[in-house]
Amino acid sequence: MEQLTPSPRIRKSPFYNATVRDGVTDFTVYNKMLMPTSFGDPKAEYERLIKGVAMWDVAAERQVQISGPDAHRLAQYLSSRDISNMVSGHAKYIAMCDHEGHILNDPILMKLDENQYWFSIADSDMLLWCRAVAFERGFDAMVTEPDVSPLAIQGPLADDLTADILGEWVRSLRYFWFKETQLDDIPVVVCRSGWSKQGGFELFLQDGSKADKLYELIKSAGQKYGIGPGAPNHVERVESGLLSWGGDTAPESNPFEAGMAKYVDTDTDVDYVGKAALRRIAATGSERLFTGLILEGSATSEWPLPERAPIYFEGEQVGTMSAVVHSHRLGQTIALAQIKRSIVVERMPVEIISPTGMQSAEIHPLPFI
């Protein structure tokens, strides 16, 4: 059996010991940190997410904190979306791009106040990028990684559980809005967000030494709802068409190829890294599109592909498939892919060299569900 060799370069989550007690069986490395991917029963973890409530250690969603007099100016320059209308307690999904318009990360940007922002990042080292940009452009701002670790409560019963532990006010919290509060003596930022389409919250713990206490408190309160541990679910992610930066994107991908066109503002006066390149791409159209596929035949359900699979049309490679699962709710084999624009627009049939051999597939818009 393959195993991961421990290293000081790979950090443990503040919730690591709690997940071990709960029987974690599999990890991945995300932002140089161990992140659980399964607790040994993927189907049960999926069912809890779809029908009940699940708790996920997602501390590997690290925060890049921008603070100081130029915090807003720097946050805007790093974001390919106009954030001028953001107020404290508001979050936005954004693309961070390089000067050629390649997408470097797709974080949630959270505005704590006029002089403090968090980029809640996907799996790439944006701390160094943000520091370099801040210094080279002369912004009066500090770029740091705070002691902040998210714990997610996801599923249709997440509102009930979170209201039990924090109060009925959480039910009125709108999507991508958040509030700083205390749970007993535990400081958290509660945001209606999470890496699923099943609803729920992320509790951004602001004191890693209290991780065990927070984890056990939520676990105990959730017993009457059938709570159990889990992780961002691969099957639900594909069914919901949620982008995985670095999994569904390649180094040369731009936001338009990643299904993020509505989160990129090119017709705006604000300046940001990659704006000129993104304007050109928006004007001409991206070469590829992020899309769904329905495949003939079967696929393994639970685990990501080890590498992207090539997609062909009439013998020519026209894209790559980045994820394929058996959808429990649809009863079909579905996939995510980046494919040549004309093939997607015209819904042309394609063929894929999948883990089970050559399979035919048809284009399907996202999300599947």
Image (cartoon, rainbow, N blue to C red):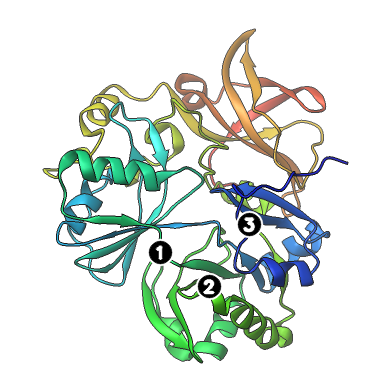
Which percent across, then down, holds residue 256? 38, 34
Number of residue marks? 3
Could you tell me which residue is drawn at 66 percent across and 73 percent down? 53
Give the label on residue 232, or none.
3
Could you tell me which residue is drawn at 69 percent across and 86 percent down? 220
Which percent across, then down, holds residue 233? 67, 55
Identify residue type, mark 1.
Pro
Say whether residue 368 is left or right of residue 121: right
Residue 343 visible in rendering: yes
Q: How crowded is mark 1: few (under 14 residues within 10 Å), some or many (20 or more)?
A: some
- Above or below, 55 relative to 24: below
The CA span between labels 1 and 3 is 23 Å
Q: Nearer the viewer, mark 3 or mark 2?
A: 2
Q: Mark 2 points at which residue?
A: 208
Say whether residue 195 is left or right of residue 287: right
Identify residue type, mark 3.
Pro
Residue 52 is drawn in which quadrant? bottom right
Q: Mark 1 points at which residue?
A: 146
